[in-house]
Amino acid sequence: RPNNKDTPLYSSSNSNNMNSTTGSSTSLSSEALSSQSKIPQESESRKEVSRTRKQRDSTFMSNVKKAYDEACAICGASRYTVDGNPEVEAAHIKPVKFDGPADVRNGMALCKLHHWAFDSGWLSIQNDYKIIVADRPNRHEYEEFSSFEGQTINLPDKTSQHPDQKFLQWHREHHDFM
């Protein structure tokens, strides 16, 4: 946890503590100690919220992961949990919330990092399946993704499962790659 320079770190075990930033002794009032030890009750700290979202299609997820051999289309990583489940996720090219269909041609298997990068607009795909990276060289994330610029994604063996051009175009337009 980062230390805020204006807020010294204290141990609540006694009221005469050493300030870990300056090394000087500091005294905490009993009021300050009691306010530190008060833990909010469930009803004070959380409120119940509900929202509606379109249901994800488990068949879509399974078919996309299989089509890509459970490997990331961007980096090729194929990782598994200790239980043997693949780390890759089935990413929609045109998301469900924008009426993207649950069709393998509207999906790619992506590792968690590249799924986030694709959904947030760091990465997109040209019609020739080459990776394009958002032109933000002043951001440190750019260096992490720029090495993929111009590389062809890993595609499913069956051409009938390759990403559809209309979904790729939608993604590029939606994330200002046009």
Image (cartoon, helix red, strand yellow):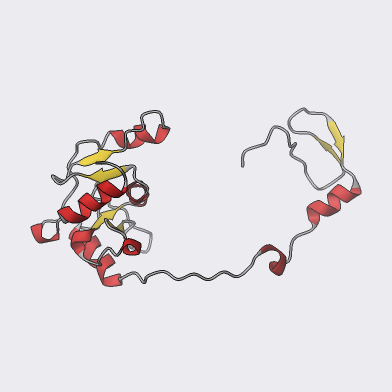
Number of numbered discs visible in the structure rendering: 0
Q: Position of residue 161 (x, y in %)?
A: 14, 60
Point 74% across, 62% down: residue: 40
* Left or right of residue 122, residue 18 in this image: right
Q: Position of residue 34 (x, y in %)?
A: 85, 54
Camera-side residue: 22 or 94? 94
Q: Quadrant of the N terminus?
A: top right
Q: Position of residue 144 (x, y in %)?
A: 35, 35
Q: Is residue 67 above or below residue 150?
A: below
Spot the residue most to the right: 30
* Left or right of residue 69, residue 80 in this image: right
Is residue 164 visible in the rendered image? The answer is yes
Q: Is residue 52 above or below residue 89?
A: below
Point 11% across, 56% down: residue: 157
Report which quarter residue 151 is drawn in.
top left
Q: Quadrant of the C terminus?
A: top left
Report which quarter residue 92 is drawn in.
bottom left
Q: Position of residue 135 (x, y in %)?
A: 32, 33
Spot the residue most to the left: 159
Is residue 163 visible in the rendered image? The answer is no
Point 20% across, 57% down: residue: 68
